[in-house]
Amino acid sequence: MADSKAKLSKRNKEGYYIVKPVPGIKEMLRMAKDEAGDWDAYQFKISETEIRHVTYNEFYETTENLGSVLTEMGLGNTHIACIGDNSYHWIVTYLTVLKTAGVFVPVDKELPAEDIVRVVNDSDSTALFCGGRFEKVILENLDKMPAIRFVIGLDRTEDGEGILSFTSLIERGKELDRSAYDALESDQNALKMLVYTSGTTGLAKGVMLSEHNLISGVYYGLQVSQPLSKGLSVLPYNHTYESVCDILVSIHKHSTLCINDSLKAVVKNLQLYKPDYIYLVPAFLELFYSNILRNIRKQGKEELVFGMIEKSNKLRKIGIDMRPVLFKKITAAFGGNLKKIVCGGAPIRPEIGKFFGDIGIWVIGGYGITECSPLVSVNDESANDYHTVGRRLPCLQWRVDEPNEEGIGEISVKGDVVMLGYYKQPGKTAEVLRDGWFSTGDYGYITPEDWLVITGRKKNIIVLSNGKNVYPEEIENYVMQVDYIAEAVVKGVKNEHGQETHLMAEVYLSEEHDKAQVLRDIQAKLTILPSYKMVSSVEIRTEPFDKTTSNKIKRTY
């Protein structure tokens, strides 16, 4: 792999990276083939001891072969759904369909059968790609999806009853003329990807994203923060955080993505592939951090490590960076090459971001929402602030609606990455999209430097009887600083009149402690906050909280 791949782009006078324009998905992939054809686009395991290497040339050819046969089957201008575990074939399907005149519909692999059927039907899909473990449920429910003309097994090498083989289609495509597929064109401002948000009740809303939305996310996102040369691809592909910010961005950056085969094997695969960057959600970062602390405490080296951090930071101030040497044994657990962790989905606890930075791994926090393709803001490497979610994409305007005395209000954004609306739901669209401004449902404030701080979700706000608004996410970040607390939810406690008078914390522990000690440890972390944000009682859970399909705790209050 060429060393030049790992270099970040130059910056303009405004401090943004200079990025080659992205004319469209087709052109973006063609550019990658022409400019980096012999470099690895993807790596993945085909056995415990063998890694498959796929070049940009091969990847491009495979999308052309699949696209040619889909066009021959009459699927060049239709809605095509895909459900499956993360895999190379999923990515091939994704890029192939994006290059058609049709629409790609990623289906959440954690949905129950009835919701899969509802999403497929609501999306007006006429073909469905599915991974091997979904074949049975799809074929058993095929009569409930009357618009589906073809089912294609992503893991199949041979056709079966009612299902076509992905491998066979690729082979058929090799014999076909590509001109019809290559001639397909679509309006860049029309629907290109239909993403159903993970709802907790009823059918999730279908977020309509255009090709312009997607390429804007790539182009402007790269201007703020950039991947390096080799990443480990971990998060679910049906979420736009991974499918746009990692998969599409890596193509335009000509990076190599290594496909993680199991969430349980993330650390093992970090050591196998030795990537220099990875996209994660805070839950992974929390786990990494707690494991590191547990190990150094077990070895009796906590004082030594934090003493080395203090000395290292002093040396860095005079231009001497000893982190690769001093913390080599710690970073070896992540493969030894990891330089950057991009973290989204929820705010990062600042002390965790600082710790990883202190040992030589950037933790870059960002903020996004599916309706914004999904990126709104991200920190950049030259001015990383763990207390914020970074600077806005250059294509966006943002504002704080109805701010309180602290400047906190609902964040609204306007610009090239904002969705077209919700599929077949004009009423729901009108609730959040007015004059091009999208109301995110997230509360926060904008710093004087024009960087964004998120304080919590609008629907989660606790209004105390004294009129104070409390954002539980803010307090939960402090509660989670108690090192044996694995999960936490802060709630308002109501009196007999239904008024929320004070706060309590419901927690799940990684090791046993009595309730009184837990409350004392939590309150010790909250002393720097105003008194009305103090937790006055605690409840200890025996089981982890229920999670959404995007691994966020379900709030049941």
Image: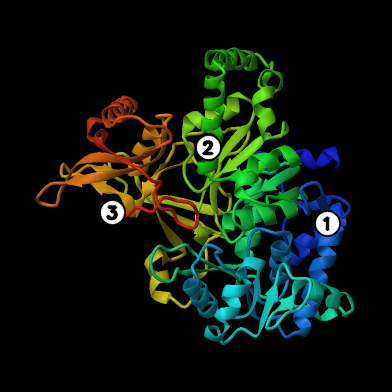
- Residue on which the image places disc 3: 557
User: What amino acid type should be assigned to the residue bearing mark 1?
Assistant: Tyr
- Report the mark closest to the observer, 3 or 2: 2
In the rendered image of this protein, does residue 127 appear above or below residue 336?
below
Give the CA separation, mark 1 to mark 2: 34 Å
Q: Of all residues shown, which one is farthest toward the left?
A: 496
Of the pair 206 and 175, the residue shown nearer to us: 175
Q: Secondary structure at mark 1?
A: helix
Does the residue at mark 3 contact the one at mark 2 (Cβ under 8 Å)?
Answer: no
Q: Quadrant of residue 467?
A: top left
Sequence-wise first label, 3 or 2: 2
Q: Quadrant of the N terminus?
A: top right
In the shown orientation, is residue 135 left or right of residue 113?
right
Q: Position of residue 492 (x, y in %)?
A: 23, 45
Sequence-wise first label, 3 or 1: 1
In the rendered image of this protein, does residue 298 appear above or below residue 407?
above
Q: Position of residue 243 (x, y in %)?
A: 63, 58
- Report the mark closest to the observer, 1 or 2: 2
In the shown orientation, is residue 322 left or right of residue 367?
right
In the rendered image of this protein, does residue 315 appear above or below residue 406?
above
Give the CA separation, mark 3 to mark 2: 26 Å
Q: Position of residue 226 (x, y in %)?
A: 67, 43
Q: Secondary structure at mark 2?
A: helix
Q: Which residue occupies 83% across, 52% down?
A: 53
Q: Secondary structure at mark 3?
A: loop
- Residue on which the image places disc 1: 56
User: What amino acid type should be assigned to the residue bearing mark 2?
Assistant: Leu
Of the pair 535 and 261, the residue shown nearer to us: 261
- Residue on which the image places disc 2: 287
User: What amino acid type should be assigned to the residue bearing mark 3?
Assistant: Tyr
Q: Which residue occupies 69% across, 79% down?
A: 163
Count of residue discs: 3
